[in-house]
Image: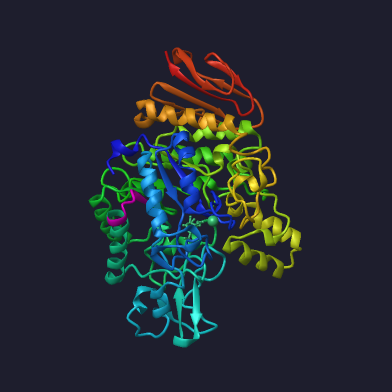
Amino acid sequence: MAQEDFHKMVGYQIYPKSFKDSNGDGIGDIAGMIEKLDYLKDLGVDFLWINPIYKSPQVDGGYDIADFYAIDEMFGTMEDFKKFLKAAHARGLKVLLDLVVNHTSNQHPWFIEAQKSRDNPYRDYYLWADATKDKLPNDWMSFFGVPAWTYQAKTKQAYFHVFAPEQPDLNWKNPKLREEIYKMIRWWLGDVGIDGFRLDAISHIQKAPWDFKIKSWKGNGPWQPFMNVEGIDDYMKELKAIFDEYAALTVGEASGVTSDKASRWTGDGGYVNMLFELEHNARKSNGNGQGSIYGYKKVIMRWQKDMLEDGWNALYVENHDQPRVIDTFGDGSLASAKAMAVSYMLLRGTPFIYQGQEIGMRNFPFTDIKQTDAAEIAINYKKLLAEGLSKDEALAQVTQNARDHSRTPMQWDDSKNAGFTTGKAWFVINPNYPEVNVEKSGELIDLYKQLIALRHQEKAISDGGISFYFEKHRKLFAYQRDEFLVLCNLGETRANLNFPDEMGDYEQVLGSKRRAFTTKMKFDPWEYQVFKIK
Ligand code: TEU
Ligand code: CA
């Protein structure tokens, strides 16, 4: 899509399973999304990114796809989806689906075929190497805490997977496989008529040679052999050519693409319109799941600077893989949720709001492993028990940063089951729903509406430059977008702002309280202000 079209936009991410159930089976569905389109329109967003709704055994929240061309029954039918698309378009909302092409489900017909024999025509759609029960092809690990290889006695080979064993990786070197994928992409963009894709785990589609030696087991070290590996550009160029044909809106999830190398990926001639970086989510090492504000600041500032000349950021503080921002970077207070919202919504880039973020949904107080769902939680819990931790200790560790926190059902009102379902919800509902819900959280919703409106109305916010103040300050996040000045105290104590005397005259646009601009100010905890040059 052309830059002038998406620079102004704001996206909203829907995790359909937990958004709205329409038929009382306890599972959010497409008809439920249709019911809530007016709510989304009223919020003011421009496009929706829908997490996977394809046919799937749901080992990894639908990121294990068994049929790229079918909607999973639990969400509805293809007819329902087409109705949804039409209804969204009628309201001027664009629709993006997740494009999950690093891997499929092990229940995908290709993989069912592929595992039958070494010479099966689909064998080469996946990645295989000789192995024995005790000796895998190499020591690489998956993101989910198990080895990246699963051995199959039948053919005396192992297959490769960077996520769960139920998610075998596709072999992008195979031109036949690529043609199948491209056909599918054309079908969704052309025949069905969706507006674009969020490209899942796309930086992993190319792998290093199997004899690549992992140099460090710290940080991103273990993932080096499958993060933005040489040769990936050829595939990305092919993908870009198709996206261009349909003027698709595209967002890449590009973990491992560093900010200094990102201009190949985004910006003028880039493979996708914008990129999600994953670096700013890093947590403090104290082990209580708290994010580091200074770390957040530093990562965001670097990406903003590196994308200024060429490139575009997809901005977010929450998604279906992260715990809730109000509890990780905030202190649980509404004030902290507001300051975090302002801190990222006015940056240079396209902001995304994750369902429930706009009402200040909180992390879930897990008390039992049975309440959890995500694939890697069970894997790591078992590991920790085997290491001798008590059940409570293990539960605390695996849930502290768990993505399940953000996957509990959306809280619409204070009626039974938070207005999410009339039946029994598929997942735990946060007990705070009588207070935290769409009907009662108007204050935060209103702030998001104001921020979205600013992005729509002010060229300085949608297209202006950016520069930062107080870069070394631990919690003051302060930036200038042409004539706008955005100031946030992302902390629980007061903070002094000392600007140079020649700053000029500013008037307040919005703020957590009334305040006139002066060059010396003392901000309250979590205070935010947006000023504009007079
Ligand atoms: O997540 C991918 C993802 O987060 C990795 O690419 C990342 O590099 C790694 O976790 C870094 O720590 C996406 C989806 O968002 C997630 O829900 C899926 O489970 C995953 O892909 C597999 O499809
Ligand atoms: Ca349902």
Q: Where is residue 524 in the image (x, y as percent from the top left)?
A: 63, 24
Q: Quadrant of the C terminus?
A: top left
Of 83 and 215, nearer the camera is 83
Q: How is the image coloured?
A: rainbow
**Above or below 80: residue 302:** above
The residue sitting at 42% across, 81% down in the picture is: 115
Can see residue 96? no
* The N terminus sits in image quarter: top left
Q: Which residue is rendered at x = 54% and y = 13% of the image? A: 516
Residue in the picture at 46% in, 15% down: 506
Choose between 299 and 116: the one closer to the eye.
Answer: 116
Asked whether residue 194 is drawn in magenta, I would say yes
**From where the camera sits, is residue 180 visible?**
yes
Q: Which residue is drawn at 66% across and 37% down?
A: 331
Relative to 102, residue 153 above or below: below
Q: Is residue 186 magenta?
A: no
Q: Tell me if residue 115 comes above or below residue 36 in the rendering.
A: below
- Classify the position of ligand 2 by quadrant: top left, top right, bottom left or bottom right: bottom right
**Relative image position of residue 156 (x, y in whole percent):** 46, 86
Residue 120 falls in image quadrant = bottom left
Q: In this view, does 301 lie above or below 380?
A: above
Instruction: Name the spot of residue 35 as percent of width and height, x first.
Output: 49, 45
Magenta highlight range: 191-197
- Percent coordinates x, y for residue 262 in the rendering: 36, 48
The answer to whether residue 170 is left or right of residue 43 is left
The quadrant in which residue 445 appears is: top right
Judge left or right: residue 186 versus residue 10.
Answer: left
